[in-house]
Amino acid sequence: MTVSVDLRSRDVVLVYMYDVDMALVTAALGVSIRSIDQCHRQFKENGNVSPNMTACASAHWSAPAEAFVEGYMKRNPSFYPEELREAGKVKY
């Protein structure tokens, strides 16, 4: 049986992050223990629960860009990501 990406994510979160008993997760979500083990193994290997995908590489910003974002966040502690994106476009 194919397990959807949504269920794979829930399996990993419930069992390995919230430490919910695996038997309870299998009963609640209707997946087998083997499926949960496979999802966790794939998550540990790829950093992602989706098949044939890997985790995103970390973004490497230049020092001036990091300083700009840090300063913007200090000046505007509650901002929308869109505002920061627009401010960055104007600056860079």
Image (spheres, grey):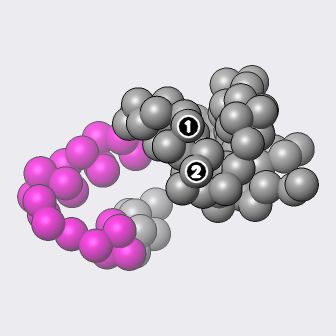
> Which residue is found at the position 87% from the left and 56% from the top?
2
Give, as a three-letter code, the residue at label 2.
Ala
Quadrant location of residue 90?
bottom left
> Which residue is found at the position 40% from the left and 45% from the top?
65
Mark 2, other Cα within 10 Å: few <14 / some 14–19 / many ≥20: few
- Give the Cα distance between marks 2 and 1: 6 Å
What residue span does the magenta drawing correspond to? 65-84
> Which residue is found at the position 28% from the left and 73% from the top?
80
The main secondary structure of the magenta stretch is helix
- Label number found at residue 27: 2
Indicate left or right for 18 with 72 as reference.
right
Identify which residue, 53 or 77, lies in the foreground. 53
Identify which residue, 80 or 75, lies in the foreground. 80
Identify the residue under disc 1.
23
Find residue 14 and report its horizontal and vertical position in percent. Answer: 47, 42
**Residue 90 shows up from this direction:** no
Quadrant location of residue 70?
top left
Find residue 59 and report its horizontal and vertical position in percent. Answer: 56, 40
Depicted 29 relative to depicted 25: above or below: below
> Which residue is found at the position 54% from the left and 56% from the top?
28
